[in-house]
Amino acid sequence: MPKPKKLFIETLGCAMNVRDSEHMIAELNRKESYALTEDLSQADLILINTCSVREKPVAKLFSEIGVFNKKKKPTAKIGVCGCTASHLGKEIIKRAPSVDFVLGARNVSKIAEIVHIKHAVEVDTDYDESSYAFGVYRSNPFKAMVNISIGCDKGCTFCIVPATRGEEISIPSDLIVQEITKAVATGAKEVMLLGQNVNNYGRRFGTHEEQIDFTGLLQKVSKIEGLARIRFTSPHPLHMDDAFLEEFASNPKICKQIHVPLQSGSTKLLKAMKRGYTKENFLNRCAKIRALCPEATISTDIIVGFPGESDADFEETMEVLEQVRFDQLFSFKYSPRPMTEAALYETQVDAEIASVRLSCLQTRHTEILDEIMGGQLDKVHEVYFDELKPYGKIAGRSDDGKLVFVDGSEELLGKIVPVRVVKTSRGALDGTLI
Ligand code: 5AD
Ligand code: SF4
C-alpha cells in the first residue's frame, strides 16, 4: 500500500461548501488515498473551497495563494474550488499561475479526473451532477449533511449564487433517502437537508422524472428508520405555503428551528431585490409559524445598505426585528457583486451609513437575544450530542437549534438526552444531564 498523500483543505462560506468539501475528499479517495492534514507545509494537495457571496473573501483569495506559495512544499499542488472558481474561472490561473487547477462549485464530482491535469479549468455552470452518487466521507459521523438540490433559480438582484451555481435542479428523492440511510447506518441520528432554496424542491429534475415537493420529501425522509431529527437550510419565505408550515409544525422528526431570510423589511426594497414577497407577507408567514408552533425558533438573514435604502426603509427592517424577535440574526452590509443586477443600480448607499445601520441592527438584536437566552434558565431540552469539546465538555443542539454544553465524554456522542439549563449566555447554554 503506498503511503497516503496529505490533503490540506480550507473551506469558506456556507454549509453547502462544507458538504462540497466532504464530497471532494470522498471523490479523491476513490482513486488514491489521501489523509487530511492541518499543516500546510506537509500537504501534497492544497484545496481552497471559496465563497463569492461578498467581496471580502474574494479579495483575500489571491493574498492567501501568495502566503500558501511561500509555505507549501515545492511539489504541492493548489486547487481553487467553489463559487469564486466558478465566477473567475481561468482568470485565477492568469493572476496566480501557481494554481494547478480550478474547479467550479457545480463540478465537484470531476475532482479526481482533473487533480493531475496541469492548469485544468472545470467551471461549467450547466453541468448536471444532480444524479451523481458521491463517495462517502463525513468529517463528523454524527453530523450528516445531505444535498437535496443544486443551483438556484431565484434572481435576487444582490446575489451572485445563481451565476456561480447555475440553475436549480433537484436531486432524486431515492438518492437522498439512500444517502441518509447510509449516514444513519454509520451513527447519524440527525440530518441537515441542504439547498439554496430547499422549499422549491421538486420544481425541476435533471434527466429523472418525479412528482414530489419539499413537503413530500420531508414526509418521505421522516420514514427512514433510525433517523430521529431532520433540519434543513435554507428555505425561502416565498415558498412557505401552509402545507409546508403544517408539516413543519406537526412532524415530530422535524426540528423546530426555521430560517426565514428577510433581507429587508421594506417592501420597496424587497421589490428592488426581486424577493417576491412584501413586508406583510413575511410577517404573515412568521405569525403562522408562531401560531402553529410556538416553540419554534426563527432565524434570519438581513442585508443593510442595499441600493436605494433610506432611513425610512431601514426603520421598516427594525420594525420587523421588533415584531418577530428573531432567535438568530445573520446580518451583512450590502456588497455589490459582479454579474448581479443591483451592482448596476445608481443609488448605492454610502458605506458609512451602511455601517451605522448594521451596528444599530446588531445592537438591538443583541438585546433581544439576551432576553431570549436569559429566559432559558432551568428549561429542559432534548439535546443531540455530536461533538467533543476541550476540558471534558461535550456539545450538542436542542431540538430548537440552541448550542448546549455539558460535562461529559464519548459515551454521549450520538445520543439524545434531556438536559436542564444551568447557565445562559448569548451564544450557548450550559446544562446538566437529568
Ligand atoms: N451583499 C451582502 N450580503 C449578501 N448576501 C447574499 N448576497 C449578498 C450581497 N451581495 C447574504 C444574504 C443571503 C446570505 C447567504 O448572504 O443575506 O441570505
Ligand atoms: Fe441567492 Fe436569492 Fe438564491 Fe438565496 S434565493 S441563493 S439569496 S439568489
Image (cartoon, rainbow, N blue to C red):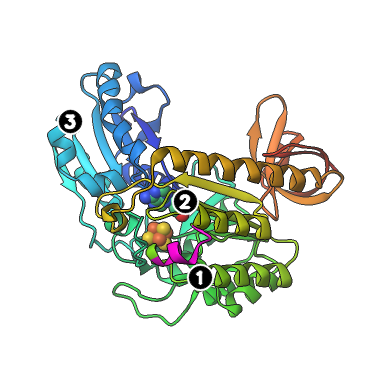
Q: Amino acid at mark 1?
A: Thr
Mark 2 within 8 Å of ligand 1, using the beta carbon: yes
Against 299, is 168 above or below?
below
How many angstroms separate mark 2 from mark 3 (CA)? Answer: 32 Å
Q: Residue at x 80, y 46 (%)?
A: 376
Q: Earlier in the sequence, mark 2 or mark 3?
A: 3
Neighbourhood count class around disc 2 (C-alpha, 10 Å): few under 14, some 14–19, many 20 upward: many
Q: Amino acid at mark 3?
A: Ala
Q: Secondary structure at mark 2?
A: strand
Residue 385 on the magenta segment: no
Q: Position of residue 398 (x, y in %)?
A: 71, 50
How many angstroms separate mark 2 from mark 1 (CA)? Answer: 15 Å
Discs 2, 1 touching: Cβ within 8 Å: no
Magenta residues (range): 264-271
Residue 96 is labelled as 3
Residue 278 is labelled as 1
Q: Which residue is mark 2?
A: 303
